[in-house]
Image (cartoon, coloured by chain):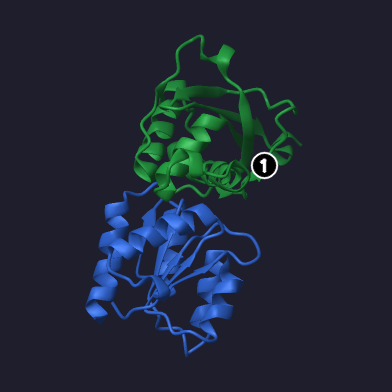
Chain colours: A green, B blue
Amino acid sequence: MRPITNDQLTELVATALERTAFVLVDPAEDDAEASFAPVRRSSLRLTGSDWTGVITLTADEGFLCELASSLLGVDENEVELDEHGQDIILELANILAGSVSLALGGDKTHIGLGLPELSDLAAPTPEAETSTMVAAESGYLNVQWSVAASSKAAA
Amino acid sequence: MNCNILIVDDSRIIRTAIKKIARVAGVDDDRIHEAANGQEALDILESVWMDLILLDINMPVMDGEAFVVEKAKRPDIADIPVFIVSTEANEERLQRLSDLGVRGSLRKPFEPEDLCQVISQVIGAKA
C-alpha cells in the first residue's frame, strides 16, 4: 500500500468536487478551523489484504448546500439540508473512498470498499494519518484518512 | 428520443444528477427510470424494457456485480446494454463484469460530458 500525503489527499478531494459538481475548492486558511461549524459527518471503511482504513468527511452547512445546489441545478436556498445534505455527504465519501483506493493500490490491487455511513459529530474520529481541510465558496469540508493493521495481520 | 434508460444507484442525489445528464443527451423525462439497488432494478425490468442500464456497483441489498450475474441468467433481459458508473477501479473486477457482457465503465468522479457521450452513443445507435 502506498502512503498518501496531505497534498495528495487535497488534490483528490479537489478533483472529485470539480469533476462531480464543478465545485472549486482551495486548501483552507490556517484559521478556518476556528469558524468551522460542522453539521454532517460520514465515514467509509476500506479493507486491504492486511490493513483496514477509514475515510471520514465532516462538512458545514454552507459547503453541503453549495455542493447539492451545484449537483441538482437549484439555488442554494432551495436545498433541504436534512434530505440532500445527508445524501451528498454519503455519496462524496463513496467517491473519495474510490479515489483513495486507487491512489493506495492502483487498479490491480483489490481493496474492498464498505458502504458509506453517517457518523455522530460528537463521537471521536480515529487518529488521522492524513487530513485536509478545503474551502469552497460557501463553506468548508474536512477529510481525514486513518489506517490500521487488520486484526488478522496483528494476530 | 424513444429510448428507456434505467439509472441504478443508491444515492438519490447522484440519480438526480445522472437524470439531468440523460435529459441533456436527449432522453425524454418519462423514459428515465430509477432504482436504488440491483433488486429494485430487476423488479423494474420485469415490466419495462430498457435500452440502457447505468449501474453503480457499491450498493446495499443487491450490489451491481450481483445484478449483472443475475441479469445474465435471464434470457429476456440479458441483452440489455449495461454501463458501469461507479467508484470501482479494480481491473480484475471490471474484467469479470466485462466477461458477463458489461459494455464499459465510467469511474466516479466523472465529467458530465463523458456520461452524456456514453448515453448518446448507446441510445443514438438504437434510434
B56, B73: nearer the viewer: B56
Residue A105 shows up from this direction: no
From the top left corner, tell me how far across and down residue A142 is, in percent: 54, 26
Residue at image x 39%, y 28%?
Answer: A25
Looking at the rendered image, the quarter that the N terminus of chain B falls into is bottom left
From the top left corner, tell me how far across and down residue A86 is, in percent: 61, 44
Residue lying farthest bottom?
B76
Name the residue carrying label 1: A118
Q: Is residue A23 above or below residue B5?
A: above
Looking at the rendered image, the quarter that the C terminus of chain B falls into is bottom left
B113, B23: nearer the viewer: B23
Q: Is residue A68 above or below residue B63?
A: above
Residue at image x 63%, y 60%?
Answer: B60
Which kind of residue does numbered mark 1 sit on?
A: Leu
Tell me the subunit letter for badge 1: A
Helix, strand or loop under label 1: strand
Q: Is residue A142 above or below residue B92?
A: above
Q: Counting other residues with Cα less than 10 Å from the Cα at mark 1, is it few (<14), some (14-19), or many (20 or more)?
A: some
